[in-house]
Image (cartoon, rainbow, N blue to C red):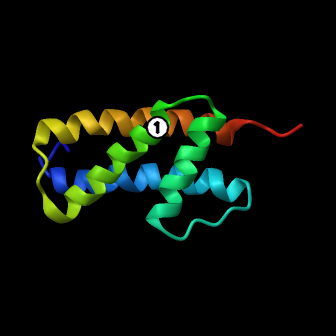
Amino acid sequence: MEEGDYVQASEKFWGAAAGMVRAVAAKRDIEIRSHGELHGFATKLGKELNDPALPSLFGTAAALHQNFYENWLPPETVVAYSGAVRQLVEKLNKLLDHHDH
């Protein structure tokens, strides 16, 4: 984002969000094959964590993915949405950190 390439930044943030959802799924031996399955799994995790914001945060990341192709979000929006992706990554990271005893 420092270089002002908000389109590239959008795709990187989307990649981080989708990558985290896939990582949590993989840890549970669930294979995600489509955007629909990514959204479905994010919704399931939101219910599981009792965190209704989680699917919305993921939806925000999906808007960044769309922005990569269409470049319609203003730079400030990309910056704001990137904050949502960071929150999502932090929340999902906790699910990967837990060591099964």
Q: Residue at x 15, y 62 (%)?
A: 70
Q: Is residue 19 visible?
A: no
Say which quadrant the N terminus sits in. Answer: top left
Three-letter code for the amino acid on which mark 1 is drawn: Leu
In front of the other: 30 or 78: 30
Q: Residues within 10 Å of mark 1 (few under 14, many from 20)?
A: many
Q: How many marks?
A: 1
- Examine the rendering and report whether any part of residue 88 can be seen: yes
Position above or below: 81 against 68: above
Q: Quadrant of the C terminus?
A: top right
Instruction: Name the residue located 28 percent from the left edge and 51 percent from the top edge.
Output: 63
Q: Position of residue 100 (x, y in %)?
A: 84, 40
| Residue placed under numbered mark 1 in the picture | 88
Left or right: residue 56 compared with residue 69:
right
Q: Position of residue 45 (x, y in %)?
A: 60, 42
How far across and down, in percent of the image, does residue 83 sit? 32, 33
The quadrant holding residue 65 is: bottom left
Horizontal side of 20 relative to 96 (left or right) equals left
SS assignment at label 1 = helix
Query: Which residue is rendered at x = 40% and y = 36% of the image?
Result: 86
Query: Please, which residue is most extreme toward the right here?
Result: 101
Question: What residue is shown at x 54% (from left), y 71% (from top)?
Answer: 33
Residue 92, how many percent across, how many down? Answer: 57, 39
Q: With respect to residue 61, does 90 lie above or below? A: above
